[in-house]
């Protein structure tokens, strides 16, 4: 937990109990989480508004990423290796999220004189692992 506390301090955030717990959940998974999903992890004992505030602080301090999924739900994920604007792929079966390569320079050059405040860059479908598992199940069912 001390490493998590240092990470929070390095991003200009105080290491509170709830911040540490939420960061541990986000860092321990390749999945993204909505606020209700995080609330269920705490058995709804933590105030939903406080969870929103923590996630907002994490996002505004560059600690996590936020994106809106294909259903319009805000989701949060920890991607330490991601720093530039880039799309994501979210598996509808297992929920894993994968950061995709940065947008081509030609895209960024077109927007150089603009103030981009939000971007929704999400691909949704079935990941390779889930496709492989489904294929293996189908093969095992054939007599």
Image (cartoon, rainbow, N blue to C red):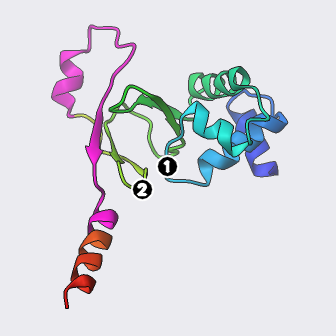
Callouts 1 and 2 close, C-beta under 8 Å: yes
Callout in the foreground (1, 2): 2
Element type at mark 2: loop
- Residue at x 29% of width, y 77% of height: 137
Q: Nearer the viewer, residue 49 or 77?
A: 49
Q: Which residue is mark 2?
A: 94
Report the residue that reaches farthest toward the bottom.
143
Left or right: 88 in relation to 111: right
Left or right: 48 in relation to 45: left
Where residue 34 sits, quadrant-wise, is top right
**Quadrant location, the C terminus:** bottom left
* Marker disc for residue 31: 1
Residue 51 image offset from top left, x and y in percent: 69, 28
* CA distance for labels 1 and 2: 8 Å
Q: Nearer the viewer, residue 94 or 140?
A: 140
- Residue at x 47% of width, y 46% of height: 81
Where residue 94 sits, quadrant-wise, is bottom left
């Amino acid at each position: 937990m001390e490493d998590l506390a240092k990470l929070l301090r390095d991003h200009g955030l105080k290491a509170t109990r709830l911040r540490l717990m939420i960061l541990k959940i986000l860092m321990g998974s390749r999945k993204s989480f909505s606020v209700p999903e995080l609330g269920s992890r705490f058995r709804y004992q933590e105030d939903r508004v406080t969870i929103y505030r923590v996630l907002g602080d994490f996002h505004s301090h560059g600690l996590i990423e936020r994106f809106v999924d294909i259903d319009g739900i805000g989701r949060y994920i920890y991607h330490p290796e991601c720093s530039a604007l880039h799309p994501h792929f979210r598996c509808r079966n297992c929920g894993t999220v994968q950061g995709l390569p940065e947008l081509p320079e030609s895209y960024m050059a077109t927007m150089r004189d603009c103030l981009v405040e939000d971007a929704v860059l999400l691909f949704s479908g079935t990941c390779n692992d889930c496709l492989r598992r489904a294929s293996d199940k189908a093969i095992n069912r054939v007599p």
